[in-house]
Amino acid sequence: MNKFPKSFLWGASTSAYQIEGSIKQGGKVESIMDTFDERQSYPKGITGFKTASNHYKHWKEDIALMAEMGFKSYRFSISWPRIIKNVKGDVNLEGIKFYNDLIDELLKNKIEPIVTMFHFDTPNFIEEVGGLDSSNFGKLFESYSKVLFENYGSKVKYWLTINELNMFALVGQTIGVISENSKATKWQIMHNLNVAQARAIKLCKQMLPNAKIGPAPNIATVYSASSKPQDYTAKLNFDQLRNWIYLDIVCRGDYSEWFKNFLKATNEELFITPEEVELLKTAKPDFIAFNYYSTLTVEHATVAEYEKSLKTPADQQSGLVIPGVGKTVKNPNLEKTQFGWEIDSIGLKNTLKEIYDRYQLPMMITENGIGARDVLTDDNKIHDDYRIEYYQKHIIAMSDALKDGVDLIGYTPWSAIDLVSTHEGIGKRYGFVYVNRDEFDEKDMKRIRKDSFYWYKDVIKTNGKKI
Ligand code: BG6
């Protein structure tokens, strides 16, 4: 195994709406995710994000468990609707205090906070000024960012702008992040988010010159399903729409020529102001954070196949069809999780190398993990050897990528403790710590260390030598 740098940020990740619960407490206003289970065809019985893992009440205990595992970092999101009360920008002091206390507790335990500023939970008041469809979104995101930088800037060094900006465009409906009232095209929404991100980066540089800020899309190597030239063409084009346009805009300051031509060919026009063009040229990140679960395999797709695909919703890892570009197909060489997500650790190494070759910036893997139906034994144990095996392979892949020269500074897999999946409930567990609740019964929310908890503790203690 290649050595991990001494300062490597081992840790894990969560997001506010999937872990906190207490959606009506502490002055929090409503977010689009609060009613997700009512709006979507969630499996029956799921008690969803309303209670989640009740981290709002258990946060101290949760941080103590992270400290016990020896975390060097913890990536969590701040809930925008817990911080800002309305479209005027009034600040909720109780929300400010909640995260202040949490950050202080992390620092007390020598855990570096890595803050996602926005992880899917758009406050509903944004709808009053046009929601994600409007350029007002960016203005409000900037004023929210200012409140974050003012309040936490002296303590937080690492900032992530928007979680999986690309997933808003690609699977926004499935994961419930786009309102049913939305009229804008997905590319316009993507652009509005890009502008919001650029505003936050620019402001961060002005207000916190010593901080580091970066995007956090979901990036993954794309394979061509065969050596047929049209499948390879699909791979290259899919790469653009799945991966690169979201990093090009923030790292290089413009959309690729291919994407501009793609918009023309599909008769779409983005509404972009000259000020936005200038802003996007200047707001550059310090590092690239990205989430990685699996690779994609694509082949050429006809327009008829695209029309058919509109009737079957896709999630992050499956069933994407982009007309004239390509469609994802199964990769027969890869094993799958219980939830059908392909497992590809070598793909992680290759993704790291591709991103580094393209942008030459330090990188952080902010999500990676295996969703599983963990079983609690009668003697209160969780033998999640499949999770340990998954992480072993992915850590080897990271080490191999380091050997090939990439600059990787941290790993915060998904997730620190069990939380509610974006659209498959608490039954799809990711944590190192089991949270005792299920879809139908919120039980006692007891925290129980899984086998992977003890294993990860050793990994961190030996800086990745003992896996
Ligand atoms: C990422 C998201 O896309 O994937 C997380 O940032 C999410 O919020 C994770 O939980 C796993 O996806 P899922 O659908 O299994 O929860």
Image (cartoon, rainbow, N blue to C red):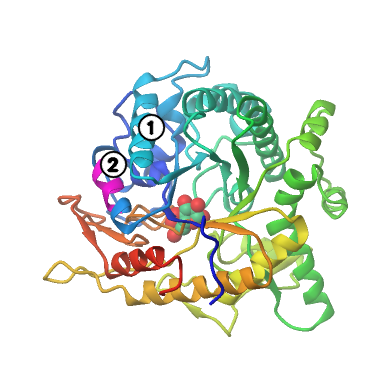
Q: Is residue 82 above or below residue 119?
A: above
Q: Is residue 134 above or below residue 119?
A: above
Residue 59, labelled with which disc? 2
> Could one spot residue 130 in this view of the protein?
no
Question: Is 63 a magenta residue?
Answer: yes
Q: Residue at x 62, y 28 (%)?
A: 137
Q: Nearer the viewer, residue 358 or 2?
A: 2
Determine the image quadrant of residue 94: top left
> Could one spot residue 156 in this view of the protein?
yes
Question: Residue 216's x, y, as percent?
Answer: 59, 49
Amino acid at the residue labelled 1 = Tyr
Sequence-wise, the earlier of marks 1 and 2 is 2
Residue picked out by circle 1: 99
Q: Nearer the viewer, residue 75 or 91?
A: 75
Q: Nearer the viewer, residue 402 or 280?
A: 402
Q: Which residues are magenta?
A: 60-65
Q: CA distance from mark 1 to mark 2?
A: 10 Å
Q: Residue at x 63, y 44 (%)?
A: 214
Q: Is residue 296 left or right of residue 53?
A: right
